[in-house]
Every structure is written in structure tokens, then in C-alpha cells.
Image (cartoon, helix red, strand yellow):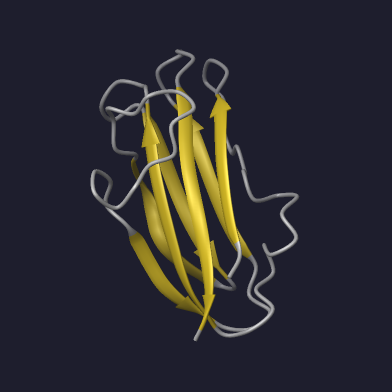
């Protein structure tokens, strides 16, 4: 099933970074179990993420877990998993904001598994 790992250095005060913008599976082709893992190298509470699927907000703007290493894909062993069921045709959107005028890196992976 599709997976999308990513690593991105954010610019100072960058808003609305959307890692899935050009992913072929950002529109879910079938009912799916979606899992997202995110970590940042930034300071606690300074990198915030919002998750949307279709017309629903899955996670309101909330802090991304810190303690990541740039370029290292997070795993469920050390990163909380945000998970939900998406309907066929739903667009998956992850929006990430950097609020501390710093340049942290965000690493993540998104899994889309057929239900």
C-alpha cells in the first residue's frame, strides 16, 4: 500500500508547508486507513501541524513532537501515530507552520492502506 516519507527544512516563520501537495495519493483512491507520523528538530511547541481529510479536520493546529533528527524517518516506536479512516476521493492535507523564526527540519511518513 502507498507510503510517502518526507524530510523538509522549514524557513523562518514558514506557514502552510504542505508535504503531500504533489503526491499522487493525496486524493485517496479507495476507503483507507491513514497513518501519519511527524517529528521535528525544532523547539517544543514551535512547529505546529493540522491534518485534514475531505471536509473534516482530523487534528487541529497542534505541536509536532520534538526530538527528531534531520533526515531520519519517524517510527511508531518513538513517535505518536495520528490515524483515521478516509473515504474514497478525500483529499489528504497536512499543513505545517513554523512559529519561532527558526529553521527546523520536519520528518514524516504517511501510510494509506485499503480498508
| Whether residue 51 is situated above or below residue 42 in the rendered picture | below
Residue plotted at (47% across, 35% down): 107
Compared with residue 40, is residue 102 higher up or lower down, i.e. above or below?
A: above
Residue drawn where x is 62% and y is 43% of the image: 19
Lateral position of residue 21 relative to residue 53, left or right = right
Q: Quadrant of the N terminus?
A: bottom right
Q: Residue at x 51, y 62 (%)?
A: 111
Placement of 89 over or under 20, stated as above or below: below
Q: Is residue 38 left or right of residue 14?
A: left
Asked where in the image residue 26 lies, by quadrant, the reply is bottom right
Could you tell me residue 62's position as x and y percent?
Answer: 33, 45
Left or right, residue 75 beside residue 110: left
From the viewer's perspective, tell me whether residue 71 is left or right of residue 16: left
- Residue at left 27%, top 27%? 67
Rendered location of residue 36, percent (x, y): 43, 56
Q: Percent position (x, y) of residue 74?
A: 38, 42
Residue nearest the observer in this picture, 14 or 2: 2
Amino acid at each position: 500500500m502507498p507510503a510517502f516519507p518526507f524530510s523538509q527544512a522549514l524557513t523562518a516563520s514558514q506557514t502552510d508547508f504542505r508535504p503531500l501537495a504533489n503526491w499522487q495519493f493525496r486524493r485517496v483512491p479507495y476507503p483507507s486507513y491513514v497513518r501519519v507520523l511527524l517529528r521535528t528538530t525544532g523547539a517544543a511547541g514551535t512547529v505546529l501541524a493540522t491534518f485534514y481529510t475531505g471536509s473534516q479536520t482530523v487534528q487541529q493546529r497542534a505541536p509536532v513532537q520534538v526530538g527528531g533528527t534531520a533526515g531520519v524517518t519517524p517510527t511508531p516506536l518513538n513517535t505518536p501515530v495520528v490515524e483515521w479512516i478516509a473515504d474514497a476521493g478525500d483529499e489528504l492535507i497536512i499543513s505545517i507552520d513554523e512559529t519561532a523564526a527558526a529553521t527546523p527540519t520536519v520528518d514524516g511518513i504517511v501510510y494509506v492502506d485499503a480498508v
